[in-house]
Amino acid sequence: MEKYLPSRKALAGRLFKQEYEKEKAQVISRLRDELTLALISDGWTNTSKEKIVNYVLVPVVFSMTTDSAPVMPKAWEILERERPIFCHGCSSHALNLILEEVMRLEWMSWALTRSVAVAKFIRNRSQLLARFQRQQKKGKEEHQRALRLPVLTRWYSSYECIKSIVDNRSTNIDLFKKKKVLKKRFGRSPAKLNEARDIVENKAFWSRTNLVASLMKPFVDAIAVLERDSCCVSMVYWQFSQLRREPIFNQRHSSIPVLVRKKILKSITDKWAFLHTDTIGISFLLDQTKKTADFVEADLAVAVESVKEIAVRLKVVTTPAETEQIGNEACAFYLKKDRWSSQTRARQGGLSPIAWWSDKVNRTSTDDDYYPLLAPLAVKIYTIPTSSAASERSWSIHDFIHTKRRNRLDAERVETLVYIYCNAGNKDSRTSILYTIDESQSDDEDEDEDEEMDEESGESSDCSGNVDGYDSKAFSYDGSEEQKSKI
């Protein structure tokens, strides 16, 4: 029989159901034998303004990761009281909230508002944007970065806006030197033209934007790490400890007000108090690639004691003797880890923590690294995700499928389409777990971005999707591709 193109009725009916059942069977087969699962949850509002929260609770679910909304801790208390479940906040969301607080400071917002003004003035004028692109290609800028605008609720995008202005400093200065041309072609809004030119010609502006970008960069780098689906949970503790010790936040700088540095450190401390759960401390303790010297204050002793408490809650241990034993195993492990030579540490670091501990689960008393009670607990701990970004992507897919032009799709059909879209592909594929960062990599090393820039029509009209200077179309939901490409 010759091949034929299926009809619209067949695609929307019989073939659609077949594809759904096939994907569902493959997903169930993949998850059936998993001993523990981690759940992430997020809310969404559909085109009918109906609020939806997607979640499922089954016995093998061990942890739940949500955003950092104020109502979440109360929900966590109920779940943890009724079920052997551990709840966590989204670490990348917490870092975004830190950036939001920091950028409200007048000293910081001064640089952002002026960067937005310059970027909008150029982007909103097609001829000027074309001149900017030509000037950029002729210039000696190391990176030909497109001008960016911040996005509401994605506060790391403020860094991208400022960085795009800083990286195009020479281009911007040369562009606004041609005063007669600018006045002739874009003089219909002299106030905006004069404002943009005054900003670009102000040396204090360039000095401030460089400092602000330097203060924001550690947070943006940390968000890029923790937003990855494959990031190990121990990286949450490591990233926050690094932020608290960041030299630019702790060392006196003649051009950075002390109040700004204190506010940044306070924001980090406050959000860390929200994120720092017992399981986060245990994950850092049991990570064979991390040093116990990196623990902050008395967190090492707290983590060892938490091992016993968590083991009792999860019924990994059932008697006082086993509780004491698992505590001794945790102490023996970190003491042994501290004695490793640099060669041994490098060799042990070749495996991700979950792979390292999975290898220890079925060992006998005659084998090295025998941790009969600690190993099963560690495997459970390392299933915890660092971020709820994957859940946000799920709702982005809902939004992509159930648009205003396709709003006649019923709820069941939308859910089925999203299910197929999300789960299509190889169910047995493995991703590389991010559990350490090459510290030898230069922090100043940037990847070239796409040179193509969006042209905006209309000389004085705002970019489509802008709200109070924020461009809702400027970035994707999952953030800085520049930062992610460096990992």
Image: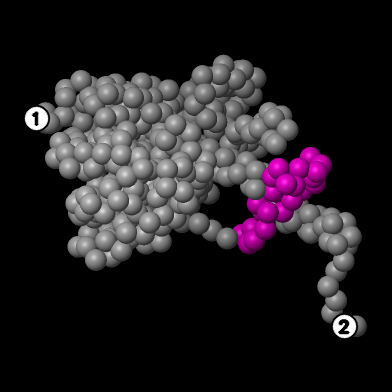
Q: Residue furthest bottom?
A: 2
Rendering quarter of residue 402: top right
Q: Which residue is mark 1?
A: 254
Amino acid residing under circle 1 = Ser
Q: Nearer the viewer, residue 272 or 262?
A: 262
Residue 426 lies in the magenta-colored region? yes
Look at the numbered discs 2 and 1 and tell me whether their residues touch, using CB distance below 8 Å: no
Q: Nearer the viewer, residue 215 or 70?
A: 215
* Tag of residue 2: 2
Label 1: how many Cα within 10 Å (few below 14, some 14–19, many 20+): few
Q: What is the span of residues highlighted in magenta in the rendered image?
A: 401-428
Residue 384, image x and y in percent? 51, 38
Q: Earlier in the sequence, mark 2 or mark 1?
A: 2
Amino acid residing under circle 2 = Glu
Q: Residue at x 67, y 58 (%)?
A: 424
Rendering quarter of residue 47: top right
Rendering quarter of residue 181: bottom left
| On screen, residue 76 above or below 233 | above
User: In this view of the protein, can residue 346 be seen by the observer?
Assistant: no
Label 2: how many Cα within 10 Å (few below 14, some 14–19, many 20+): few
- Total number of numbered discs in the rendering: 2
Q: Secondary structure at mark 1?
A: loop
Residue 130, image x and y in percent? 36, 59
